Amino acid sequence: MYRLSGVTKQYSRGKDTVHALRGIDLVIEDGDQLVIQGPTGGGKSTLLQMLGGLDRPTAGSVELDGVDIAKLSETKLTKVRAENIGIIFQSFNLIPTLTAQENVETALVPLGLKVSERRARAAEALESVGLSERLHHLPGELSGGQQQRVAIARALVKKPKVLLADEPTGALDEGTRDDILALLDGLWKEYGLTFIMVTHDSAIAKRAPRVATIKKGQITVKDQAAAAK
Amino acid sequence: MFFTYLRRELRRRKKAAIVISLGLALGIALVITVNSVSAGMTQAQGKVLQSLYGLGTDMTVTKAATPTAASSGRPNFDFNARDDSKSQSSDRVNVQGFQSLASTVVTKVKAQSGVKSAVGGLSLNVTKVNGTFDRGTFSQAPNAGGQNGGGQNGGGNSSGQPQGQVQGGGANFSIDSYTVYGTDVTNLDLGPLTSSKITSGRAFTSADAKAKVVILDSAYAKTKKLKVGSTLTVSSVKLKVIGIATADSGDSAANAYIPLTEAQTLADSKNKVTTIYVQATDSKKIDSVKTAIQKNVSGTTVTTSADLASTVSGSLSTASSLATNVGKWLSIAVLIAAFLVAALLTSSAVNRRVREFGTLKALGWKSGRVTRQVMGEAFVNGLIGGALGIGLGLAGAYTVTAISPTLSASLASSSGGGGQGGPGGGGFGGPGRQAAAKAIDVTLTAPVSLNTIALAVALAVLGGLIAGTFGGWRASRLRPADALRRVE
């Protein structure tokens, strides 16, 4: 479970100070799906970075299962990322020189698994996203949708508690977008993940059980599932 | 994963890898070539010094010559005019170059701390004049009183002396000059003869101490058409040729080698030597031994190989200077440039891969693992550069050896000696510094030692590490969030 209290993030840009997040308070229960939307520069990606332990807040706390990850040492925070958090990026961020299977394996390298186990789990993860025939293809040999599937397999292969997705369909056409969303939805339900997704797409937001909107660093949360009942 | 990732990345960034490797290769090749040429120079200088000193000699002890009343005059040859036109010959045997030292000094030098062995030698210069001297014939002028008499022109005069002129007569002679070195046959491990090999006949033995025997330098023997069994006459003393010696490199130290006792007798220098050849117990103690001898054996000049090497001039000296100065600094400059280029290109490659490394960190890779990956790539670049550099360097060294340029070395006569001696005074190439005043030709080789190869490997590793450290440091400072904001 995530519990964010008074999370503030400020950046210095030249002489100016940018307030990306202004005292965010937010609770995300285990197994929840939360969609974060808002205008560009509103603080969506910054909030996702705080949740993923990719950056630290200027003030406030980001608790994951009762541990304030904002105050962890770099080594411990790296371990949290390696074991508990899966991240999907808008541009896939695959290593261009590694095959699909090897790219998925990169997420298992920090766990210190044996090579054979790494390979088996990577193959299994790729199979779960429908890419069992593309294990040995380089990213350049795959379509955008297939690359994002590899990225999803890489995020899920370590069986994380949390899946964070930053505009996962932003670089895809409409048809592929729906496939990926359906895949993510299925995996969320199958694995019981806490799934947090940043998106510009209002259509996606409308389907989500909870939607958080961030404007000028401030958040409002709407529980659509509860409202529907 | 480490090696797969490393190999694929190097292949992906082939051009940068080639530039980095070639830069390092050039620097390392230069280091190998310059090092091996320098080693060749040292060897060449060693050959020059060896041809003067012989093997194993660390220093010589001499006493500089000072002109004396007896020696300052011109050489004197006695010939008598005779009627029979028979050939006459006269030899003059001089101690060459240095003032002689008493044989007891050898013992004194040998007793010094740090001296392993010391042996004395006597360097002589022999000038032989051969020829015929005919008496002229006086012819009386017509209408003059007929009476033979000496005189040149028999012009008429009123004194009543016979008038006429001397016809015929005169002299026809040749001068032959050569060097003779008196060798202590009881200790043949030191001295100039050690730089020659006996190619015919036999070497001296202790039994030859008082024998009238001689070993000739092969070049001199060839010129004079002498061989083993022939006889060389010096000042009416007939010496039997028992061996022919050929110098290992350069010119030989003397034209003829005879037992020391015989040399002392011929030069009328009983119990005298001109040069003492000294071998130290430890090559690192040469300076201290020199100091000890200078302190304890007064009036002597101690010359080490290093002292003599400093007087080497000619193309060998110039080339040596080029190799040590220009070559060394050029190598260092190219290496620094190569290291910098490698470091900058590696750092630049990291900058282009910020998102890649950021992603890996976001996936949970530790900074150390990312840094190791970058350093590994740079290290392999360094090794490839090292291998290429070793190949290029070996090719360079091989080329120098194949061309084998001939260098001449001249050793200045800095002793101030040479006042004594006959015609030619010191210009005949006897042992010691006086002899060194001539030029010696040596061929340059470029031997590549294991140390040089080890140095090259070390430089390659260093180059890779420097480049990797730059890139690794840059990679380690990346934050995953910063990395994800960057767009390639």
Image (spheres, coloured by chain):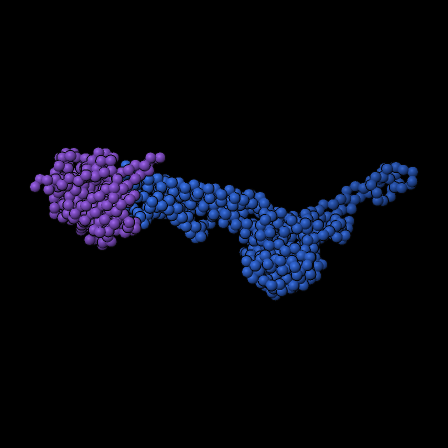
In this orientation, does residue B258 appear?
no
- Counting every numbered tag in the picture gives 0
Residue positioned 46% across, 49% down in the render = B447
Looking at the image, is B67 positioned above or below residue B14?
A: below
Q: Point out residue A95 in the picture as x, y percentages from the top left corner.
A: 25, 42
Q: Point out residue B255 in the picture as x, y percentages from the top left corner.
A: 62, 53
Quarter that holds the C terminus of chain B: top left
Q: Point out residue B293 in the picture as x, y percentages from the top left corner.
A: 63, 59
Tell me, by letter, which chain the rendering colours purple. Answer: A
- Compared across the picture, whether B294 is left or right of A62 comes to right
Residue at the farthest bottom position: B207
Q: Nearer the viewer, residue B235 or B197?
A: B197
Residue at the farthest left position: A229
Q: Nearer the viewer, residue B107 or B145?
A: B107
Which image quadrant for residue B302? Answer: bottom right
Which image quadrant for residue B352? Answer: top left
Tell me, by letter, which chain the rendering colours blue. Answer: B
Residue positioned 33% across, 35% down in the render = A16
- Compared across the picture, whether A50 is left or right of B50 comes to left
Residue positioned 77% across, 42% down in the render = B168
In this orientation, does residue B479 appear?
yes
Residue positioned 75% across, 44% down in the render = B170
Q: Point out residue B401 in the picture as x, y percentages from the top left corner.
A: 47, 46
Q: Nearer the viewer, residue B203 or B254?
A: B254
- Compared across the picture, whether B173 is left or right of A186 comes to right
